[in-house]
Amino acid sequence: MTLRLPLFVLAFALTGCFPISTPITGGHVGCDFRDGSVNGPEDRCQDREGLDASVFGTSCESLEGEVIDGGCDASDALGGCDISEDNASTTVINYYYPPMALADAQAECTSDEGTWVN
């Protein structure tokens, strides 16, 4: 019995089911679709604050986006569209970049029922 408890704890730690591993929340990650995605190149990068790259990165890669640890670079963006759900622990903003026109980006934000942010 003495050996089973440490093996049990070790088994959970190795599988990530025991809270010894890195937390999955509280990070900042982006998924950049400008170089390509399952839909082809898109002039946007989706930024998620409150999620770690180890969680959102898998989804991003499955959509053929580029995982950006630390979030999207919004410095050259036209603006962003906050599509976060009410009371969510994660902030989700789609940043749009040229050559997309500002009016098209804002129309897409309206279509997504988001809030435009600069």
Image (spheres, helix red, strand yellow):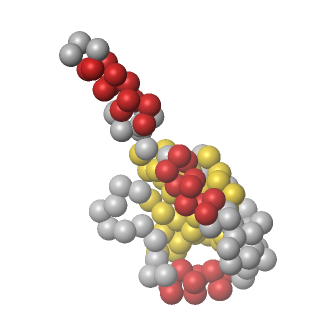
- Front residue of 9 and 69: 9
Toward the front, the furthest residue is 1
Q: Where is residue 54 shown, x and y percent of the image?
A: 53, 46
Left or right: 54 as drawn, with respect to 15: right
The answer to whether residue 99 is seen in the rendering is yes
Q: Where is residue 94 shown, x and y percent of the image?
A: 57, 68
Q: Where is residue 65 shown, x and y percent of the image?
A: 67, 63
- Front residue of 71 and 25: 25
Left or right: 112 as drawn, with respect to 5: right
The answer to whether residue 47 is seen in the rendering is no
Q: Residue at x 21, y 16 (%)?
A: 1
Toward the top, the furthest residue is 2
- Give above or below for 7 relative to 107: above
Left or right: 22 as drawn, with respect to 73: left
Q: Residue at x 78, y 77 (%)?
A: 99
Q: Residue at x 57, y 53 (%)?
A: 57
Find residue 39 and report its image quarter: bottom right
